[in-house]
Image (cartoon, rainbow, N blue to C red):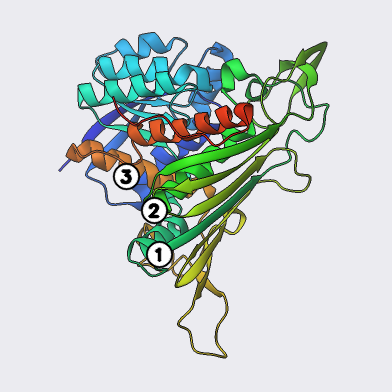
């Protein structure tokens, strides 16, 4: 019997466009799915570039106006992978047009817009999701399971760092991620956002208050002439512009469950390419995760016998780990792209069964309130609370 087809439109074709396109093509190759995704149309502003992406990534059609794509009656899912300042408008319009929506993080660049997107999702009753792909790394999903089962006991600490170096050279031009009007914020919204969502996911607790510090070290850069769409291959112009986002943001936090936490995100850490590392400590043990070794966990449990106490290296590739039964024998590792494959599998399964996907727009809103509270704290130099999570 032929599987139900779900027609997908992808808005955006660069870094996340490539990751999402691959995931739609691969999900049904690994997982036994009730539905079959159809890569119907990919959309972007540059006709030349989006047409190339259409052929490269295997989409049936291309378009240059997202409004036209949303208005089509042959589209079931809108997947948003555009610059941050467009997320809210596209998501809300798509939901109002009766489409299920998967949106890259952040949900919006302001709390008010994020709240409106969440409210629209609830009012329409359509499936909605925010793309925090790290939740779908088997090791992180398994760590969350261990915490939920009480293996670490009461959680006391979470500490995370997300370090990159791709703009450490002052000659890197003023790309959109360095423009507050487009990106919303810098390393904070780009990198701390992942740590914030991970902490909420693993601990199943919300932030109660935060205290932040941020700095912009390289305050002026050359304007951008062109880009290949990735995090390199930039061409600079002779004109200069002001960097309007943070280079580094660190903050302290308290959680509703009583845990304390520290977070640091920077894109000016020489030698660090994608160093997303966090540790969680409970009364009965600790777990350490490093995205650069994403198939492993370090686990310490206090009830190990004397002489055997120590951090154990756990292979997160066992078939009983989340998602891993779809892949290879134990210790045959998966990669970054599979976090998206796992996410797309979950999302399409939720669409097929009319079941809400997680993380959803409420998660996107809650993450935005934490980002916002840290920004306010950096200005006020006092502890700040996230705004109330209500619609």
Q: Which dot, 1 or 3, sits closer to the camera?
A: 1
State the image coordinates of residue 228 (x, y, percent, origin top left). 67, 25
State the image coordinates of residue 130 (x, y, percent, origin top left). 39, 34
Q: In this view, does 41 lie to the left or right of 109?
A: left
Packing grade of label 2 (10 A; few <14, some 14-19, many >=20) is some
Residue 154, label in figure = 1
Residue 108, label in figure = none
State the image coordinates of residue 160 (x, y, percent, origin top left). 58, 51
Q: What element carries label 2?
A: loop
Mark 3 = which residue?
A: 346
Q: Distance between the residues labelled 3 and 2?
A: 28 Å
Up-down relation of residue 194 to residue 290 (above or below): above
Q: In this view, does 126 lie to the left or right of 239?
A: left
Lower sequence index among marks 1 and 3: 1
Mark 2 = which residue?
A: 257
Is the C-beta separation of discs 1 and 2 under 8 Å?
yes
Q: Which of 319 and 365 is in front in this view?
A: 365
């Amino acid at each position: 019997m032929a599987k139900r087809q779900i027609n997908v439109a992808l808005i955006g074709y660069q870094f996340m466009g490539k990751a999402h396109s691959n995931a739609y093509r691969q999900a049904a190759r690994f997982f036994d799915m009730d539905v079959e995704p159809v890569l119907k149309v990919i959309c972007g502003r540059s006709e030349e570039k989006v047409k190339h992406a259409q052929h490269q990534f295997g989409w049936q059609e291309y378009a240059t106006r997202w409004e036209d794509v949303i208005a089509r009656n042959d589209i079931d899912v809108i997947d948003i992978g555009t610059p941050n300042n467009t997320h809210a408008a596209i998501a809300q319009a798509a939901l109002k047009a009766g489409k299920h929506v998967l949106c890259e993080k952040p949900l919006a660049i302001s709390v008010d817009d994020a709240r409106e997107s969440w409210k629209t999702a609830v009012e329409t009753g359509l499936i909605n999701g925010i793309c925090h792909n790290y939740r779908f790394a088997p090791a992180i999903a398994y760590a969350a399971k261990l915490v939920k089962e009480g293996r670490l006991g009461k959680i006391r600490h979470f500490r995370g760092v997300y370090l990159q170096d791709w703009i450490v050279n002052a000659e890197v031009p003023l790309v959109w991620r360095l423009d507050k009007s487009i990106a919303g914020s810098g390393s904070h919204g780009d990198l701390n956002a992942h740590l914030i969502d991970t902490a909420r996911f693993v601990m199943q607790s919300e932030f109660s208050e935060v205290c932040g510090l941020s700095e912009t070290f390289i305050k002026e850069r050359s304007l951008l002439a062109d880009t290949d769409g990735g995090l390199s291959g930039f061409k600079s112009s002779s004109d200069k512009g002001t960097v309007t986002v943070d280079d580094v943001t660190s903050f302290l936090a308290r959680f509703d469950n009583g845990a304390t936490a520290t977070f640091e995100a920077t894109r000016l850490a020489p030698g660090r390419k994608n160093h997303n590392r966090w540790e969680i400590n409970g009364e009965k043990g600790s777990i350490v995760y490093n995205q650069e070794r994403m198939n492993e966990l370090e686990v310490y449990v206090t009830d190990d016998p004397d002489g055997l106490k120590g951090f154990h290296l756990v292979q997160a590739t066992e078939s009983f780990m989340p998602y891993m039964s779809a892949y290879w024998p134990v210790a045959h590792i998966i990669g970054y792209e599979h976090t998206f494959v796992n996410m797309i599998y979950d999302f399409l399964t939720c669409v097929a069964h009319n079941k809400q996907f997680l993380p959803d727009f409420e998660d996107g809103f809650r993450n935005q309130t934490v980002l916002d509270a840290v920004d306010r704290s950096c200005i006020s130099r006092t502890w700040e609370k996230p705004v109330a999570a209500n619609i």
